[in-house]
Image (spheres, rainbow, N blue to C red):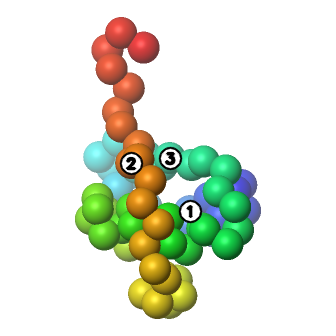
Amino acid sequence: MARTFHEVADDEEVMAYDAHGGIFVAWAMIKKEFQNGVVRHLNDALGPKIKNKAGALKKAKPVPVQPPRPKSASE
């Protein structure tokens, strides 16, 4: 995961958000065979501003999961 974060640190589209408080990410342990489907579902459901550019995601069958949710003020 750390390698991926370092890679996107060189992406101008990602770094443009730094001036506005940065970006937020969520992660969970997902079995390899479900990963592309989970990402496809979250992309479809949440419509992120920065899209995952992996071509395999377009062909993946969506795997429904609960999307991340913001922390409440009491957490």
Report helix, strand or loop for mark 2: loop
Cα–Cα gap, marks 1 and 3: 16 Å
Quadrant in the rendering for residue 74: top left
Cα–Cα gap, marks 2 and 1: 24 Å
Mark sitting earlier along the chain (3/2): 3
Residue 1 falls left or right of residue 54: right
Residue 26 falls left or right of residue 4: left
Query: Badge 1 is on which residue?
Result: 9
Q: Amino acid at mark 3?
A: Ala
Cβ–Cβ below 8 Å for labels 3 and 2?
no
> Which label belongs to residue 67?
2
The residue under the point 46% across, 80% down is: 61
What percent of the width, then of the height, locates residue 67? Answer: 39, 48
Query: Badge 3 is on which residue?
Result: 26
- The answer to whether one can see residue 52 in this image is no
Cα–Cα gap, marks 3 and 2: 9 Å
Mark sitting earlier along the chain (2/1): 1
Cβ–Cβ below 8 Å for labels 2 and 1?
no
Q: Is residue 23 above or below residue 14?
A: above
Report crowding for label 1: few under 14, some 14 to 19, many 20 or more residues within 10 A (C-alpha). few
How many discs appear?
3
What percent of the width, then of the height, locates residue 54? Answer: 52, 83
Q: Is residue 41 above or below residue 72?
A: below
